[in-house]
Amino acid sequence: MERNWSKNDIIELYNKPLVELLYEAATAHRKYHDPREVQVSTLLSIKTGGCPEDCGYCPQAARYHTDIEKNDLLSIDEVKSAAIEAQNSGSSRLCMGAAWRNVKDDAEFDQVLEMVRTVNDLGLEVCATLGMVTENQALRLAKAGLYAYNHNLDSSEEYYKEVISTRGYQDRLDTLDNARKANLTLCSGGIIGMGESVEDRAGMLAALAAIRPHPESVPVNALVAVEGTPLEEQKSVSIWEMVRMVATTRIVMPTTTVRLSAGRTDMSPEGQALCFMAGASSIFAGDKLLTTPNPDCKSDHELFDILGLIPQKAYKKGSKPAVDESYKDKPDLEEKIKWSRPGHKIERNEEAKKKAKSIRNEDGFEPRKITSVSSIDDA
Ligand code: SAM
Ligand code: DTB
Ligand code: SF4
């Protein structure tokens, strides 16, 4: 039976003397996991940049001016080569990310379904993070061989409003619900270091822990403050906050895979070691996350050797989904989708957008021809 956690219980836990918190987390970790095993995932950005959303942390939002290389949807061959490379480097999961607000029932989605099938055929666990999904879309992904769907709550419901105005918290919860209904495993977590309080961190964990059963994996990201985004000036979170967040997540959701996600390039090997002691049981490997740097495989291999960690085999915690050819069947009608668009003004997002416009004007910058970009000003 999963325990009911109130926000206050979680705050109390988070604020415990660190040595006690660590011990409690390490104890919970050993109860449900082999402490030497770490699940290793590789991220692959299958469609980069030009996103119509206003997520304040994200370098891929078209409205901010950031230095990323944009890319249309990758081909199936490109994905297959990247997947083989990830597998050869020791990853058991490939997580494909697209800079989309939501999945649409179009030719690009058909191509993503083929990518899922191709990566599943290789024996890797397949994860996707494509924005909001309906139940039918989630079902087609599952039939094509998807194992996990990533969609983060990002923060508490209250602080989320300070970060994103183009979609609502409930849409996020509904998306997770749709993925669960399709029997996909859930990967959902958030970001610390966006200026949120400890209460917000606890609020996010309480919201995740209210999902029953708990998400199978919970990524804990430290904000990567990217120039040009509204959060560019946020100071990096201290390792102690990261250790507390990982430990608290481990205790609140003892059976989940806690993923030490973005932000590892700023962490020392010793800091990361503490996170593993605190119950982190997964990482993203490879020298790039989606658009920002990540420690290279060589340094991760060295760290694993020093700590005696071993990469987990694919499908250790669940069975490989069998492909059901009916994923190819087109839905008769696009479901009536009612994703929200709260549309309130977030001062720092507005500022970053204004700054981007003036940089583009100064440079004589031509807006890229991405259909979604034209709707940004109206968002
Ligand atoms: N577009 C899809 C969506 O938003 O669901 C999928 C990709 S999106 C980049 C996936 C997640 O990456 C976000 O929800 C956020 O938690 C994380 N993320 C994005 N930019 C980040 C940053 N600068 N630092 C840390 N995490 C970040
Ligand atoms: C998650 O929680 N973190 C990953 C994955 N899920 C998709 C993404 C991190 C992105 C960091 C910023 C970037 O590289 O663009
Ligand atoms: Fe970035 Fe995803 Fe938000 Fe788009 S929806 S801006 S890709 S986090």
Image (cartoon, rainbow, N blue to C red):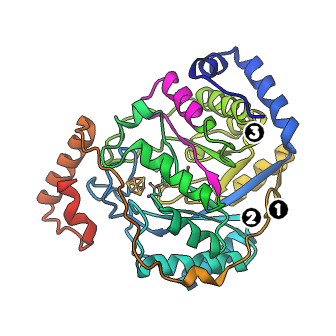
The vertical placement of 52 against 324, above or below, is above
- Give the left or right position of residue 305, taking residue 11 as reference: right
- Rendered image: mark on residue 161: none
- Depth order, front residue of 207/94: 207
Upstream in sequence: badge 2 or badge 1:
2
Q: Determine the CA span between mark 3 and mark 2.
A: 18 Å
Decide if ligand 2 comes within 8 Å of the CB at mark 1. no
Residue denoted by label 2: 92
Q: Residues within 10 Å of mark 3 (few under 14, many from 20)?
A: many
Give the structural element (helix, strand or loop) at label 1.
loop
- Give the left or right position of residue 378, taking residue 68 as reference: left
Q: Is residue 74 visible?
A: no
Q: Determine the CA span between mark 1 and mark 3.
A: 18 Å
Whether residue 187 is in magenta: the answer is: yes
Dot in front, 3 or 2: 2
Upstream in sequence: badge 3 or badge 2:
2
The boundaries of the magenta stretch are 185-207
Upstream in sequence: badge 1 or badge 3:
3
Q: Which residue sits at x=48%, y=36%?
A: 155
Whether residue 4 is in magenta: the answer is: no
Residue denoted by label 3: 276
- Rendered image: mark on residue 313: 1
Quarter of the rendered structure image containing ligand 3: bottom left
Percent across and percent down for residue 197 are: 47, 24
Q: Amino acid at mark 3?
A: Phe
Asked where in the image residue 362 lies, by quadrant, the reply is bottom left
Q: Which residue sits at x=34%, y=34%?
A: 162
Q: Which residue sits at x=64%, y=79%?
A: 117
